[in-house]
Amino acid sequence: EPEFKPEYLSLEVLSQEFAFELLGMCRNQSEVTAVLNDLGDSEEEEELDSQAFEEGIPNLARLRLAVNYNQKRFVAHPICQQVLSSIWCGNLSGWRGSNTLWKVFVSCSIFLTMPLLCLVYWIAPKSRVGKMLKIPVIKFLLHSASYLWFLIFLLVESIVLEHKHHIFLGRSQPMWENSLHMVWVAGFFWYECKEVWIEGLHSYLLDLWNCLDIVILSLYLASFALRVLVSGRGHLHCLDAPSSPECYYFTRAGRHEWQPEDPQFVAEVLFAVTSMLSFTRLAYILPAHESLGTLQISIGKMIDDMIRFMFILMIILTAFLCGLNNTYVYYQESQRLGKYGLA
């Protein structure tokens, strides 16, 4: 009902103001916990309240509900930010006050020792080191380090393709040399499945980064499946008839002999597109930095304005082109328009 839009907007403002002032009236930690964690009896709220988290981390169901409904004032309240900061740092209370050089040193150390730390956590998750790795800021650094290693392996595979291109011209390339990244893809797939299980499908799809993750994982799995398909078909054809044209095509034929719709062509295109998307996924890490995060938000808002401006500009250009075409359409077969100054 657009006629009542101003009234609805005023009610929305009053609701946000009430929630903001209610949070400001909290006098101790127990009241803050009651406001941020307790929910009503609706189906959506019960679904948020029942989601499981790590031991020692509060549910914050009310805060997550405010995020879903874009309640910026409530989320930006100093009390909410203080609670989030305490959860983010965990037992590392001095992390926020430490200087940049120390943070860079810790991040580089985690990046270099990431495989060892993951092994320790897998063997002894209840140990002192395992409990420290459960702190959200350390988990974030570990996930970021793992993703950077994944991108490094993608670059290594590209370098191998460049320096050993004579091997990869046909079907003779080893499967393991261009499929090491699938170890990370399998881990990412399992992580996304756990995230859907914890948050629920509806909440998971509200984040556009998760939609991008689905596209990236789907393309990686499709590319790998096509490579396996080519290898499997070659093995089956050669097993039945080693001298058949199909066996030659899927095992020894050069690229110039492949059909345009060859599965390996499709797999390579999918892999190239997915590699590009994987590097753009690094933008997900930027909001963790105070300066880069705000800059990324500003760029996102600017892109929205640019799209609107380009839409208006396209209308003006289309009108100009239509008029220009109507003026010169009669001279399309002429080598010149006429005498100088008359066109």
Image (tube, rainbow, N blue to C red):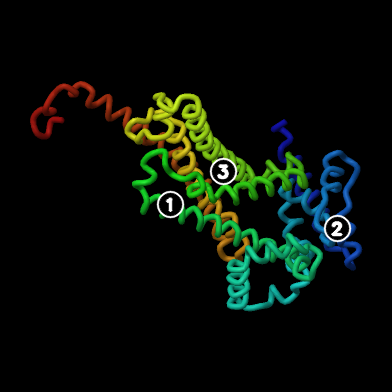
Residue 22 is tagged as 2
- Asked whether 154 or 81 is in front, the reply is 154
**Residue 201 visible, this angle:** yes
Q: Where 65 sits versus 23, above or below?
A: above
Q: Name the residue carrying label 1.
A: 158
- Of residue 20 and residue 254, the one placed in the foreground of this image is 254
Which residue has dot 3 on it?
Answer: 216
Give the amino acid at mark 2: Leu
Could you say where residue 221 lies in the image, as x and y percent from the top left? 57, 40
Residue shown at the point (83%, 55%) measured from the top left: 59
Vertical relation: 109 (above or below) 53:
below
Q: Which mark is residue 212?
A: none
Q: Earlier in the sequence, mark 1 or mark 2?
A: 2
> Which percent across, then down, holds residue 114?
63, 64
Q: Is residue 27 left or right of residue 329?
A: right
Q: Amino acid at mark 1?
A: Ser
Q: Secondary structure at mark 3?
A: helix
Quarter of the N terminus within the rendering: top right
**First in sequence: mark 3 or mark 2?**
2
Q: Nearer the viewer, mark 3 or mark 2?
A: 3
Residue type marked 3: Ile
